[in-house]
Amino acid sequence: MSSILQAVDDSAVVFSPYWKSAFRPAVKRGIDLVCAGSLLIVLSPLLVALAIAIKASSPGELFYRWRVVGQGGRPLLSYKFRSMVSNADELKGQLEAANEMRGPVFKMTHDPRVTAAGKWMRRYSLDELPQLYSVLKGEMSLVGPRPPLLSEYQHFTGYQKQKLSVKPGMTGLWQIQGRNRINDLDDWVRLDLEYIRRWSLWLDTKILLRTLGVVFTGSGK
């Protein structure tokens, strides 16, 4: 998972001038380390409870190996709590006709593969918590463009690949402005490119605060 699939051409991407600062990206990385490490410690009882609920809900592995693509087109292996049946990837082909997204991304509001525990975890984005480990490793950030699945990225256009000009994140503008309402991949990419263009530490702070509101209201699916 370490080789670059295809270099991302970011020549057309408009970057915030703050990306070129030596100080601000370092602060962003410091925030990632402190917050991700602290959350993994503070939320450890919740993580144990979620693990028990997953195992009790359906047979299979505790974690879903999330094979996605990171900055510059580099494949990376991240993890989520498993929220679907163990053979979900094998069943995906049978559900393609019900895909609600335009573009090489799959989304289905009432996906029959989601387990009972998975529905509750997804509502509050709790299945995403293991990604904090990827943030600690430096492969992801708390805030950034959403990383696409490896299988999706292979069908991306050059325009869509531009979203990977910076490190992907656990949340971003797509989370607080679109989330469940987005049904076109290009709209998703537009929000990611807007984030790259507008990025600042203050924007990250606002996104994180608004993400807390989205999570606590349980608007996930």
Image (spheres, rainbow, N blue to C red):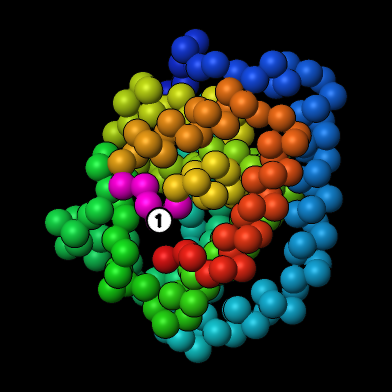
Vertical side of 74 occupied by 79: above or below: below
| Residue under the image location 45 percent in, 71 percent down | 83
193 vs 39, left or right, is left
Q: Residue furthest bottom?
A: 56
* Position in image of residue 65 (x %, y %): 49, 58
Callout 1 secondary element: helix
The C terminus, quarter of image: bottom left
Q: Is residue 172 magenta?
A: no
218 vs 27, left or right, is left
Say which quarter of the image contains residue 2: top right
Residue 132 versus residue 121: which sits nearer the camera? 121
Looking at the image, how many numbered discs can be counted on the residues? 1
214 vs 123, left or right, is right
Say which quarter of the image contains residue 125: bottom right
* Position in image of residue 77 (x %, y %): 54, 48
* Position in image of residue 124 (x %, y %): 55, 69
Residue 164 shows in the view: no
Query: Residue under circle 1?
Result: 180
Vertical side of 88 occupied by 171: above or below: above
Dominant secondary structure, magenta: helix
The stretch of residues the image draws in magenta is 179-183
Vertical side of 49 occupied by 172: above or below: above
Residue 45 shows in the view: yes
65 vs 126, left or right, is left
Q: Does the magenta stretch include residue 180?
A: yes
* Position in image of residue 173 (x %, y %): 54, 42
| Residue under the image location 36 percent in, 47 percent down | 182
| Residue under the image location 70 percent in, 52 percent down | 209
Vertical side of 75 occupied by 127: above or below: below
Local crowd size for mark 1, using a 10 Å CA cut-off: few (<14), some (14–19), many (≥20): some
* Three-letter code for the amino acid on which mark 1 is drawn: Asn
